[in-house]
Image: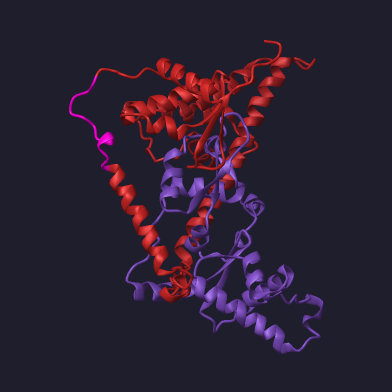
Amino acid sequence: MKEININQLEFEETSSRDKLYSMIESLLFVTGEPLDLNEIARIAGCSYEAAKVILDEMAENYQKPDRGIRLITMDGSYSLATKPENSSFVEELLGSSFRQSLSQAALETLSIIAYRQPVTRVVIDEIRGVKSERAINSLLEKKIIKECGRLEAPGRPILYSTSEEFLKYFGLGSLKELPGIESFMDEL
Amino acid sequence: MPLNIKLENFEGPFDLLLHLIKKNRMDIYDIRIHDITTQYLEYIKAMEEMDLEITSEFILIAATLLEIKSRLMLPKSHDGDEDEEDGDNTARELISKLTEYKRFKIAAEYLKGRLEGTGALYTKKAEIIEGSRKAPAPEDYLSKIAMMDLYNIYIKVISLQNEKFDNRNVFKREIPIEKFKIEKKMEHIMNEIRSKKKMKFSTIVHGCSSKTEAIVSFLALLELIKLKRVKAYQESSFTDIFIREEELNEGN
């Protein structure tokens, strides 16, 4: 397996970087599903860091106004998606939108999960001051949130986190694109 | 006096409280507890009159408000009363819960805005790549097999099939009285072993007249092993089981 050193990337012939870039792009194109960074590096035969550098670059390149594709990332997995600005055209082609509106309860519950993940139902109930079971179930049904293990505490309650579907639903490239929860304090 | 409270749909007691604070143009950190409590209770009363379900969460906050309010009416003592501190804590706790809830309510507003203002992202379905791994060709997996091997395998399969229809293995319509007893079989096995020192389990099975007898023999063997009266050996699965008598401990 050929290891590619990131520091050497610039010095080596650009063709090797270009080759790696195009290889990774092909992998992402063909899988459709989120592809783990380790898996990408393994198949492309390069180091984890080199693959990461290429992917960061790719994400930036897709930001150009003439690109219709975006790179979305979650939990160290990457996948290609269409640009949110083009969603109405995509929807016309597909003949439907997968998004449905969410109730106020669901939105409140989702915002708590998004900012506090992984989080248990009890914590959500406490913050909202009301039971949130139904909201959680409807979010689970829409696959916007997922169960992500259990808290090692009495009763081993289920932990919830947002899913990749959440990013797609809200047109986000990664969770980092969510504004920090502190920014909402200014409005208090 | 007619009640002119417009009943809005609130997500919960915190939502209602935030609404009342906003309506009264109060600061969340500087609530006029008397006004808020009165209005909160009025709202609950209106809910009651409209036969709306008042959940325990609403009652809990009503109780909390009344507690804070009643503590405020008590004269303040200077030497930091414990009760007073508790009261302060209740109020502080309520305020911190309210601010936290409000923050997430704004976050929810933000998400709602994104849902309306930003398009969704679409991804492809996972690719189904067929024929990427070809099934091996017959000449590959048959290359090391001679005609004779196939014949032998065939004979073995057929004889296994015939064995299934062995008369001994067919259930009779009548259910016979229990002819074989584990205790008897254990005795039988022990006697056999004592005379032969070592024997194969298959010889016992072959001497059986029915499936039931074979099963009872096997159970008897298991029982003898458990009682440590015999030792059983088997090289690998489905091979013959050898049995010999357990050597008694010298102390015994």
Quadrant the N terminus of chain A occupies: bottom right
| Residue at 18% from the left image edge and 24% from the top image edge | B174
Residue A161 relative to residue A14: left or right: left
Residue A27 image point, x, y percent: 56, 75
Highlighted magenta segment, given as a residue range:
B165-176
Tell me the colour chain B is drawn in. red
| Residue at 81% from the left image edge and 85% from the top image edge | A11
Q: Is residue A188 visible?
A: no
Which of the 4 image quadrants contains residue B220? Answer: top left
Q: Is residue B145 visible?
A: yes
**In the image as oriented, which residue stretches furthest toward the top?**
B252
Confirm whether the magenta stretch covers residue B160: no
Nearer to us in this view, B29 or B185: B185
Identify whether A135 is placed above or below A40. Answer: above
Nearer to us in this view, B83 or B129: B129
Nearer to us in this view, B69 or A86: A86
Q: Which chain can be seen in purple?
A: A
| Residue at 47% from the left image edge and 29% from the top image edge | B58
Which of the 4 image quadrants contains residue A26? Answer: bottom right
Which of the 4 image quadrants contains residue A13? Answer: bottom right
Q: How many marks?
A: 0
**In the image as oriented, which residue stretches furthest toward the front?**
B195
Residue A48 image point, x, y percent: 71, 68
